[in-house]
Image (cartoon, rainbow, N blue to C red):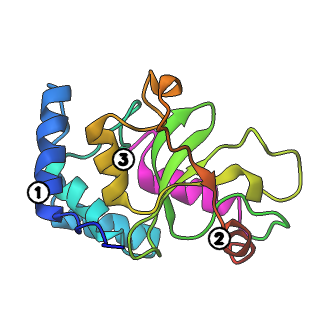
Amino acid sequence: MVDAPATDIDDLVRRVAQRAASDSTGLPAPLGDDRITQAEEELGFALHPLLARLYREVADGGFGPDYRLLPLLGPGSAVVGEYLTRREASVGVEHPEWPECVVPILTWGCGMYAGVDCLSEDGQVLLFEPNPYSGGSWEPCWFLDSGSLAAWLETWLSGNGWFEEDADHRDDLVEPRPWDQAASRLTSAA
């Protein structure tokens, strides 16, 4: 079996920037290094490198699938604020909801989020879907959407994601599957 060629990250960022600019006339400005550093200091860990590049080179959110990426910092719903709020609610409880170092980057509505695992070398993209929660562990609410942030972005660029409007009519649809690290990561989150 031959491995698929690695994604050229520079080319991917360029294509994401082109798509973002064509989808929206009012994109926020990209962030400077000082704002990325401030966000990482508030989070207590480094953002995944590709995620940091998106905020540094494309825009401070406002692009991407469906509801679009959240701004990194700021009032209202933003990556850092959402993460800190969810982590605060997960510390010291029997059943933590949110694992460490998974930053919510996009809301799908109805309490659902896309998140990037900043501990994952490839920046796994996770789906938090709270509807299966029935008390006890939050493990059934965590799904692996994509093995890497780069692949997730490629799916968005190609229009082949499960989140696309006509996705349920396709035979080749790849839906998120349960995240096999959920139990261990949520246990360590307490």
Q: Are marks 3 and 2 in contact (CB under 8 Å)?
A: no
Q: To which residue does mark 3 refer?
A: 74
The residue sitting at 74% across, 38% down in the picture is 131
Q: Estimate the x, y position of residue 175 in percent, counting from the top left.
A: 55, 43
Q: Estimate the x, y position of residue 141 in percent, counting from the top left.
A: 71, 50
The residue sitting at 45% across, 21% down in the picture is 166
Q: Secondary structure at mark 2?
A: loop
The answer to whether residue 118 is seen in the rendering is yes
**Depth order, front residue of 67/126:** 126
Three-letter residue code for mark 3: Gly
The residue sitting at 18% across, 63% down in the picture is 9
The boundaries of the magenta stretch are 73-91
Three-letter residue code for mark 1: Asp
Q: Secondary structure at mark 3?
A: loop
Of label 1 and label 3, which has the lower sequence position?
Answer: 1
Q: Callout 1: few (<14), some (14-19), or many (20+) C-alpha neighbours within 10 Å?
A: few
Q: Secondary structure at mark 1?
A: helix
**Depth order, front residue of 87/177:** 177
Q: Is residue 94 magenta?
A: no
Three-letter residue code for mark 2: Gln
Q: To which residue does mark 2 refer?
A: 181
Task: Name the quadrant containing residue 51.
Answer: bottom left
Q: CA distance from mark 3 to mark 2?
A: 30 Å
Q: CA distance from mark 1 to mark 3?
A: 29 Å
Q: Estimate the x, y position of residue 105 in percent, counting from the top left.
A: 43, 49
Of label 1 and label 2, which has the lower sequence position?
Answer: 1
**Depth order, front residue of 76/79:** 79
Q: Is residue 77 magenta?
A: yes
